[in-house]
Amino acid sequence: MSLPAVSDLNRLSLYMRPSCPYCVRVADFCGQAEIALENRNIAEGIHLEALMTGGGKRQVPCLQIIDDQGQSHWLYESLDIIGYLKQQFAI
């Protein structure tokens, strides 16, 4: 599955838990690269429910990507998320 290209940060949301080391890895990268993602802590029930419904599993970190047609794509694995962000934002 190919992921859509985005240049608008409003199309990206990071589902995470602050205590998750892999989530911290993505957050640290975003801080260094000055990429301000919307973080959605799955400790809040509404975000966990959205992750489970949309992504299909509880695993974090997970990047939700909304394409031009409004469809959601879900990307798991911290290194895959970082790789995607590097590609999209030419870092």
Image (cartoon, rainbow, N blue to C red):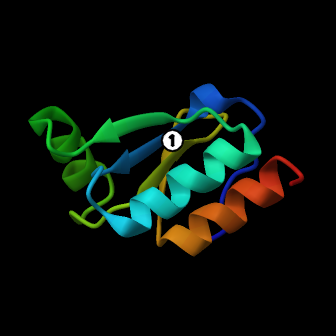
The residue at 65%/60% (across/down) is 3
Q: Viewer-proximal residue, 73 or 7?
A: 7
Note whether 87 is above or below 68 in the view shown: below
Q: Quadrant of the C terminus?
A: bottom right
Please give left or right for residue 63 compared with residue 4 in the image.
Answer: left
Please give left or right for residue 9 compared with residue 90 in the image.
Answer: left
Please give left or right for residue 19 compared with residue 49 in the image.
Answer: right
The residue at 51%/41% (across/down) is 71
The residue at 48%/52% (across/down) is 63
Pinpoint residue 1: horizontal percent, then vertical percent.
60, 72
Q: Viewer-proximal residue, 30 or 53?
A: 30
Pinpoint residue 16: horizontal percent, then vertical percent.
33, 51
Circle 1 residues within 10 Å: few <14, some 14–19, many ≥20:
few
Note whether 81 is above or below 16 in the view shown: below
Tag 1 residue: 71
The residue at 41%/59% (across/down) is 23
Q: Quadrant of residue 45?
A: top left
Pinpoint residue 5: horizontal percent, then vertical percent.
76, 48
Pinpoint residue 59: horizontal percent, then vertical percent.
28, 67
